[in-house]
Amino acid sequence: EDGSAAWLRYAPVPGASNYRSLPSAIVALNSSTSSPVFVASQELQKGVKGILGKQLSLANGTNKASSSIIVGTADAYKEAYGNFDEADELEDDGYFLSTKGKNVMIIGQNPRGALYGAFEYLSRLGQGKFSPVSYVSNPHAPIRWVNEWNNMDGSIERGYAGLSFFFRNGLVVENVTRAAEYARILASLGINGIIINNVNANATLLSTRNIDGIGRIADAMRPYGVQVGISLNFASPQTFGGLSTFDPLNPAVDAWWANITDQIYKRVPDMAGYLVKANSEGQPGPLTYNRTLADGANMFARAAKPHRGVVMFRAFVYDNHINESNWKNDRANAAVEFFKDLDGKFDENVVVQIKFGPIDFQVREPPSPLFSTLRNTSTAVELQVQPEYLGQNCHLVYLAPQWKEILEFDMRADNKGSKVKDIISGERFKRPLGGSAGVVNVGTNATWLGHHLSMSNLYAYGQLAWDPSQEPDEILQDWIRLTFGFDRHVMNTIVDMSMKSWPAYENYSGNLGIQTLTDILYTHFGPNPATQDGNGWGQWTRADGFSVGMDRTAKNGTGNAGQYAPAIAQMFENIDTTPDNLLLWFHHVNYTHPLKSGKTVIQHFYDAHYEGAATAQTFVPMWEALKGKIDDQRFNEVLFRQVFQAGHSLVWRDAISRFYHNKSGIADRHNRVDNYRYRIEAEKMTLDGYKTYAVSPFHTASGSMAII
Ligand code: BDP
């Protein structure tokens, strides 16, 4: 198995012969081949055949066999058979699933709801969950999108699984088969929208030929209920349209966007909408003309409104040339500073898309304070399914526990319950829109993400977007049954490794809220703590010979803690009530500062790095013990990654420990740093055909030396 089937393998289930009460036919209450209802009937046929070995017939029209699987919308059901009691309980995209009684009923509020119900039914069968059920399931939020940072040349920004299957050589590809396959995977999670191109957008996507190409992709994804949207480059009217300006308040610019939007919607009448990154990391935006970010967002909103399009406007706006010498400066403050005065000024079809933390997908961040700042604006959380700063799918890092912490975090707006999950759903502040956007960056690699085990992240992302009340370990178990089958040893091993993986990665990368400590300037991969400070990017640690951490208090620091609602602000402002895992995010302390655990900061650094790397070592034998219980291809490909992770975790451990040992001059109580009794340094051996070279940065190799 090469992983391309993801969790939709429809593998035979042990004990399936006990499941007798299966209907013999499928009745699809819509036979148009482009309808998700038709796709649902095909999927049911294929799934039941695979899982239970039974060939179901597809009934013509609405005539039921003595017992059938009926799939369709609530309206179609009522039209065909009269009453449908649960209709009132269904919300947009929701479904009713009943396996009680002689028929199986899969009834969606709309066509894609019916498809979601069919996938849910197949997921239950595929996991051997045969007991009769009857329930309505509605999504937590209307926007459940993925973002794909694909470039027009076919590369993928921060993509770790091959090339784009949307674009090549500046054009949309002709063959959109894989786009349809991806849409199928997304639909199985209830994901209803996709942005197909990079947030650092290229205006040539708006050429007539490429608009037709967007149409091709949309046609391929539509049967799965996945609506396509695109990222826009703010300067397009000038750089692509030939106007002299891209000022959002210039009527010619406004007209240009209205016109191009009409053209796109003519080809893609159900386009989801736009995603905009403006005035961030060198991207153009309204600030160039002294217009506000709301002026910019509303320009797109006006153009999209007649087509019922949504504008996702990113809150990831900051200056990447900030002056480090001023201790009041803080990139973490940027989003609230840019957006707080704009609350209520965005058009109704604008959603502000907020990265989960104030900086940038680090291994540990508090939730962005913007979630509780915007009360009259719809918001969505942006999560990274492909872990850019967390090992780039060369390491196993199961992210659902991290997302869950953010979603469940109570922001205490107005001192009332204000969990992030209830803010983004629109419930807390009574907003019409909201939800989540996951940056996935799948590519042409058969595994979709580059690592078989990382697919649990995509699965969990979709599950939490639909229903954030679910528990990460339970989501994981479902995924394992569908992906690897029912062997208990396989189940226990993958659960154990996955649930340990985020804490382990945090342990061997950046602790106590200091951030991930990767190379910040280019790769965002591998240890390079020296790059955190001394540049304008603002991911500072302020590490010197005695102390470390960002002072974000009001008293002596950047005041960032004060951006939270009072109860939360107070907790972070005070060093005693700040949890240890965010200590260095909010406070600047001596290396000898005692933690709640009683250890000093520096000793915690050492211990955590040794513990984390030790945990990563155990993943290899744990996985090796599964030989023969998993097909060889996936077994070997995962093993390759685990071995890499085990080795790389040692590089991390040593580099970070050495860096802070060197900076602080404080010895490790256990005398481990740079003290390897059994290690033979390569450069000390007799070298035949190799030569030594001094590595940079020095801390990534013991004694600063490597051989090539
Ligand atoms: C950073 C990525 C960069 C993205 C940027 C963004 O390194 O490639 O363009 O985020 O989200 O983390 O806009």
Image: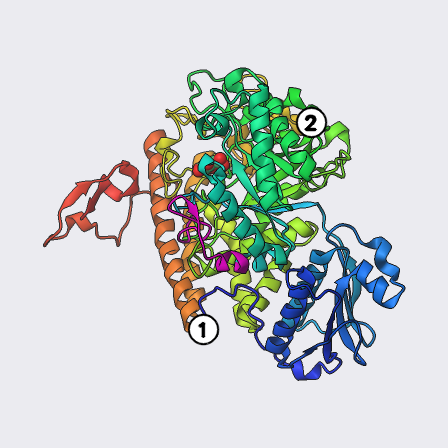
Q: From the image, tell me which residue sits under label 2.
A: 565
Marks 1 and 2, Cα distance to the nearest angstrom?
A: 51 Å
Report whether 554 appears left or right of 565.
left
Asked if residue 357 is positioned above or below residue 488 in the image, the reply reads above
The residue at 27%/51% (across/down) is 677
49 on left or right of 526: right
Residue pictured at 15% horizontal, 48% vertical? 684
Please, what secondary structure does the residue beneath circle 2 have?
Answer: loop
x%, y% of residue 17?
A: 67, 84
Mark 1: give few (<14), some (14-19) or many (20+) Cα within 10 Å.
few
Quadrant hosting residue 186: bottom right
- The image shows residue 599, relative to residue 708, as above or below, that is above
Asked if one can make out residue 366 in the rendered structure from this viewpoint, the answer is no
How many neighbours does mark 2 have within 10 angstroms: few (below 14), some (14-19), or many (20 or more)? some
Q: What range of the chain is rendered magenta? A: 159-181
Name the foreground residue: 448 vs 483: 448
Q: Position of residue 628 (x, y in %)?
A: 44, 76
Q: Is residue 278 above or below residue 614?
A: above
Q: Quadrant of residue 51?
A: bottom right
Asked whether residue 179 is drawn in magenta, I would say yes
Q: Residue at x 54, y 41 (%)?
A: 230
Of the two numbered discs 1 and 2 in the rendering, the one whose residue sits closer to the viewer: 1
Q: Which residue is mark 1?
A: 631
Are the residues flagged by discs 1 and 2 in contact, CB closer than 8 Å? no
Q: Residue at x 68, y 30 (%)?
A: 372
SS assignment at label 1: loop
* Amino acid type, residue under disc 1 in the picture: Asp
Q: How far from the left and from the top, in percent, is residue 401?
A: 59, 49
Q: Earlier in the sequence, mark 1 or mark 2?
A: 2
